[in-house]
Amino acid sequence: MNMMKKDGKTLYIVVDAVNGFMKEGNLADSYIFNIVPTIIRVLTEIKQKDDYLFFANDKHDALKSTELKNFKEHCCGGWESQTVDELIPFEKEANGVFYKNNICSVLCDDFREAILALDDIEEVVVMGCCTDLCVMYLAILLVLLFHQHNRNINVTVYKEAVQTFNDDLVHRREEYNEMAFREMQRMGVQVKTLGKGDI
Ligand SMILES: [Zn+2]
């Protein structure tokens, strides 16, 4: 009997790499699109491996969404909720594409259950936007979800693979990135700089 433990797999999650946040729309900031080449690099490198890939995209019903009382209208299905063209080839080969009606993907039952059903993962890597919103609430809630189920799974965020929007008056990009990195670290997320050999 072979007692050698097989190394666990990694689940990569791309959150909100959608047109409505990266290209055009009330909440779009084209600066965020600058992370797409990094995401492509990571996803290209993992293609040969046996890892998992999920996409989680924002999608609201314009008539029903209560989130739209807090945020300007955005990602109401259609083009805005679609993954940017540059990542579509990866989405087509992904293990799951999920749509969320709130900031925190983990609150979507199908998404959460799909993650818990993966019994051979030892790490989850979160990429996408926005650092202080959908990335942070996904990464932290994953840590808490894994604690709840006593699952020994690291959650990792690479700084170069996440980004947020800028508003000089109320939401300075670097300030909110740093705030989110600190808060994620405080809650047990591994916040790293993407180096060679990390993927
Ligand atoms: Zn939304």
Image (cartoon, rainbow, N blue to C red):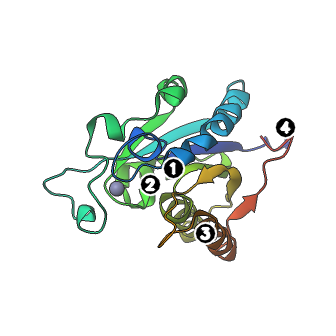
Q: Amino acid at mark 2?
A: Arg
Q: Are marks 1 and 4 in contact (CB under 8 Å)?
A: no
For discs 1 and 4, the disc positioned in front in the rendered view: 1
Q: Which residue is mark 2?
A: 112
Work out whether 179 lies above or below 75. Answer: below
Work out whether 131 lies above or below 84. Answer: below
N-terminal of the pair, mark 2 or mark 4, is 4
Q: Secondary structure at mark 2?
A: helix
Q: Which residue is mark 4?
A: 2
Q: Residue at x 78, y 48 (%)?
A: 194
Between marks 4 and 3, how big is the CA–CA gap? 43 Å
Q: Residue at x 84, y 46 (%)?
A: 195
Q: Where is the N terminus found, in terms of image quarters?
A: top right
For discs 4 and 3, the disc positioned in front in the rendered view: 3
Q: Which residue is mark 3?
A: 180
Work out whether 151 lies above or below 17. Answer: below
Between marks 2 and 4, how big is the CA–CA gap? 32 Å
Between marks 1 and 2, how big is the CA–CA gap? 5 Å
Q: Secondary structure at mark 4?
A: loop
Q: Amino acid at mark 1?
A: Ile
For discs 2 and 3, the disc positioned in front in the rendered view: 3
Between marks 1 and 3, how big is the CA–CA gap? 23 Å
Q: Are marks 1 and 2 in contact (CB under 8 Å)?
A: yes
For discs 1 and 3, the disc positioned in front in the rendered view: 3
Residue toward you, 74 or 168: 168
Q: Amino acid at mark 4?
A: Asn
